[in-house]
Image (cartoon, rainbow, N blue to C red):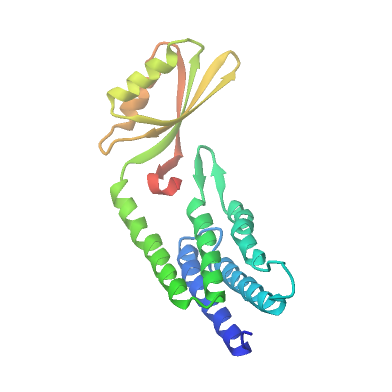
Amino acid sequence: MITDGEIALRLLVAGILGGIIGYERQAKHKAAGLRTHTLVSIGSCLIMILSISLYEMVQGKTNADPARLAAQVVSGIGFLGAGSIMKEGLTVKGLTTAASLWVVSGVGLAAGGGFYVSALMTTVLVFSILVILTRMEARLYSKQFINIVVTSEDRPEQIGAIGACLGCHGVSIRDIKIEENNHHLLFHLLLQLPDKHNMNCILANLAAIPGVKSVACDSAGMVREHELQ
């Protein structure tokens, strides 16, 4: 049987390691921060301790498998992770936080099982990934993204004309959504802009396409590629 002192140690280690990852998320002002990650880690640790203790209690007395209790943590944490994912227009945010919650549950299970080195190394790796790779992405993916809405007449060749116009400026279409409104087509475009671009010139050329009625630029839609994850 696991002693009370060992149980307290495992819960403490799980709380500290989960809090380290949660602190990084809290510093980035994410939906799930320090408290959430700490609670997930401690809860996972407790469930693992219960699984081990129950197995020792019923070993040789029944065919039941108490280890299934810990196994449900991995699938159950998905519901909490889904709550941290938000969709704003064409962008999806919170995937990294959802993944960190999932990893933290594993850290808690490892600590609950007494695998302190595994739990510690995982925490170090995750924290390094969240801190270092975020900075690397900010440098590698320096190109900006912007949402625009093009209102046009319903012409079969219109999407091709818009794509050709954007291509001349080195602009890539990352996502597109087409709606019909009052016998007109609304093209909702997520554009990837090159390092050197003239936004006014791009919008003017789009507006000059035959059949285009208006071009609206969502300045609040300016995002970095690493923020889409």
| For residue 201, above or below residue 224 | above
In terms of image quadrants, where is residue 14? bottom right
Residue 134 horizontal side relative to residue 195, left or right: right
Furthest toward the left, the residue is 196
Image spot of residue 115 (x, y percent): 49, 75
Q: Residue at x 45, y 45 (%)?
A: 228
Residue at the image point whose x is 40% and y is 11% from the top: 210
> Residue 71's x, y, as percent?
62, 62
Q: Position of residue 73 (x, y in %)?
A: 62, 62
Extreme-right residue of the structure: 62
Q: Which quadrant: the N terminus?
A: bottom right
Q: Is residue 57 left or right of residue 226?
A: right
Q: Residue at 31% of width from left, 24% of height from top?
A: 167
- Looking at the image, how many numbered discs can be counted on the residues? 0
Foreground pick, 68 / 227: 68
In this view, 185 is above or below 127 = above
In this rendered view, identify the residue nearer to me: 217 or 169. Answer: 169
Outermost residue toward the front in this view: 60
Q: Is residue 75 above or below residue 17?
A: above
Residue at image x 51%, y 44%? 92
Q: Is residue 29 left or right of residue 136?
A: right
The part of the image, by quadrant, that contains residue 179 is top right
Give the x, y percent position of residue 121: 41, 71
- In the picture, measured across the screen, residue 2 lies left or right of residue 94, that is right
